[in-house]
Amino acid sequence: MKAALPHQEMARLQTLRRYCILDTINEVAFDDLTRLAAQICDTPIALISLTDESRQWFKSKVGLDVDEISRDVAFCAHAILQPNSIFIVSDTLLDHRFATNPLVTFDPNVRFYAGVPLVTSEGYTLGTLCVIDRVPRQLTPEQVEALHTLSRQVIAQLDLKLNLHKLERITIHESQHIGNLISALSHHMRTPLLATRGTLRAMLGGAFGSVNDTWREVFENFHSSNEEILKLVETLLNVSRYTSKFGKSLSCDIINWKTIFASSIKSSNNTSKKKCEITCKIPPSLPPICGDEFEIQQVVQNLLDHAVLWSDHSGQVTLEVAPMDVDNIKVSVHCYGLEIAPKEKEKFNHFSQAQNRRGKAELGLYFCRLIVEAHGGMMGVESNLSDGNTFWFTLPVVPNPSRTSYTSCKKCDV
């Protein structure tokens, strides 16, 4: 006998779809509740079923191989009609509604059914938590109460998944919105900053007349500050590019570490106010690494700048690339200096907007992490007073190509 439709069937179906649960994979949280229901009631079959327009689909099942059955023959289609009580059929052969049901006369040969409706806070019944046996029987009051308790837990799990899904959508939307604002703001800031750079350079070069020592110092300070802000804006634009779904296309060439190290060392020597003796180590034979050489150089440059910043008065900095294991290489920049505090190390390893001891926002490190992760690698820092500070990142080895070699270098004039 086919069941009638519940009151407000369209609203019930809309609520069911809002949970986004139909046709999802098995989950331990639901399977545990189903197994517990079967154990408490001592039945060979237990199900968490959800009823849509035409079928009864099983989110979790014990003792049954099929994933769904037609709503026309489903016992749960009857159970959802009474949301406030358990639906029990003690002997299906004695009930005219089910005596000729194919689920009774054929496999799985249902002779006993008990289903507790899964009712949302709005009062809509999505399906049931049910137990089934192949022999006639009764449930004790304690078993009935236990099924009601478990059914509420099923709804709690469904609500949890729904709320997490809503939170994820909100978070993604907000992140996209914030990213768009940052990108727009950075673009608008970049133009006047570039114009200011040009004007300050012209003034320092005497384009508007001679500049005495006092004003030269002022203009140079302005120029330095403008450059710092411009670098920040450029980094914001790069971060925005990487975090957008359109900004993750990378070239893929064999990385030449000799070229990258030489460029990074030269740049550091030209721009850093703190002069260090930078040495580098490249073994004669390295497994090949594919990636975007320009982007990888930005990472090396950033870590080298950090090492120079954290180095002590001796100014000894070592830049090294070496195999880490059969699948990865490790690039590290080592220096001796003040030990990085655990709190700062934690910020570095998680690449939040950490503050270094000079007070600069480490947005550049976050950008480096995006580059490295886009290449399939990881980043981190190791620090202690005796061994010094090591800033590092890893990159995966190209599988099964011919190995490549680079000439090792020991001095900073690679």
Image (spheres, rainbow, N blue to C red):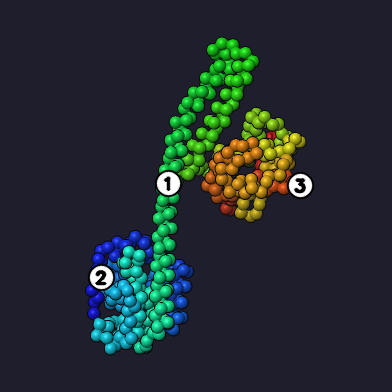
Residue at horizontal 73 percent and vertical 40 percent from the top: 337
Q: Amino acid at mark 1?
A: Glu
Which residue, given by chain and number where applicable, does mark 2 sit on?
6
Q: Amino acid at mark 2?
A: Pro
CB within 8 Å, label 1 to label 2: no
Q: How many numbered circles does the render carry?
A: 3
Between 35 and 87, the residue placed more toward the observer is 87
Q: Earlier in the sequence, mark 1 or mark 2?
A: 2
- Give coordinates of residue 353: x percent, y percent: 56, 43
Q: Earlier in the sequence, mark 3 or mark 2?
A: 2
Vertical relation: 6 (above or below) 175: below
Between 258 and 192, the residue placed more toward the observer is 192
Between 43 and 378, the residue placed more toward the observer is 43
Q: Of helix, strand and loop, which one carries label 3?
A: loop
Q: Earlier in the sequence, mark 1 or mark 3?
A: 1
Residue at horizontal 47 percent and vertical 34 percent from the top: 186
Vertical relation: 174 (above or below) 165: above
- Give coordinates of residue 173: x percent, y percent: 41, 48
Which residue, given by chain and number where applicable, does mark 1 sit on?
174
For residue 386, the mark is: 3
Residue 32 in the figure: left or right of residue 103: right
Q: Nearer the viewer, mark 3 or mark 2?
A: 2
- Give coordinates of residue 231: x percent, y percent: 55, 32
